[in-house]
Image (tube, rainbow, N blue to C red):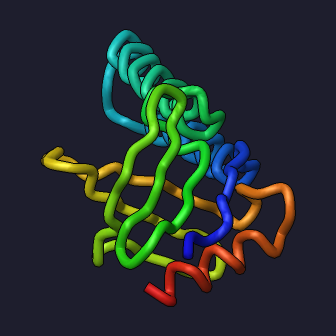
Amino acid sequence: MPSPEFKLQASKQYRILLLLSWFSSIVLTLYLPLGAVSKVILFSLVSWYLGRIAWQFACLRGEYAVLSLQRLSGESWQLRTRTQHHEAVLRSDSTVTSFLSVLRFRIGSRYWPLTCLVFRDSFLKRECYKQLVVVIKMW
């Protein structure tokens, strides 16, 4: 019997973490023994990269951002991204905590796993995260 479908929403905690990463990169860039032009280039690259991650994954706008997940039976999970539905297997190197879950899924014969960061506030209802943790630990 399949578990309920867990629909994800953009996480404020994830966005705050990315904002803190961006701010710390500004501070570190300022203290590097480089010229002004090098600092501007480095800061621009880091800002572009963190902005891309924020847009694709923190705001759930990317092609591979997981929008919902559902455990089907046994090790099988159904993942829905913006463009596709995937049947996947949850890998044993996934990490589940009370604050954050790093879920790594193997999809078919793809070499690289699909990684999904799920924060506590990734759901409309707070108890949905607890339910997801229970469903994962039952695996």
Residue 2 location, x and y as percent? 56, 70
Q: Quadrant of residue 13?
A: bottom right
Who's the residue at 32% across and 33% down the image?
33
**The furthest residue to the right:** 125
- 86 vs 106: above or below: above
Left or right of 59 in this view: 121: right
- Left or right: residue 92 compared with residue 65: left
Residue 70, image x, y percentages: 56, 61
Q: Nearer the viewer, residue 43 or 88?
A: 88
Residue at x 52%, y 56% (from the top left corner): 117
Total number of numbered discs in the rendering: 0
Q: Residue at x 84, y 56 (%)?
A: 124
| Quadrant in which the C terminus appears | bottom left
- Give the left or right position of residue 39, taking residue 132 as reference: left
Residue at the bottom extreme of this rendering: 138
Residue 45 x/y as whole percent: 39, 21
- In percent of width and height, residue 39 lies at 40, 21
Judging depth in this view, the residue of 131 and 16 nearest the camera is 131
Rendered position, 43 above or below 86? above
Q: Residue at x 37, y 23 (%)?
A: 42
Which residue is at the far front? Answer: 1
User: What quarter of the picture does the N terminus occupy?
Assistant: bottom right
Up-down: is 48 above or below 85? Answer: above
In this view, the residue in front, 125 or 88, is 88
- Relative to the observer, which residue lies in front, 70 or 65? 70
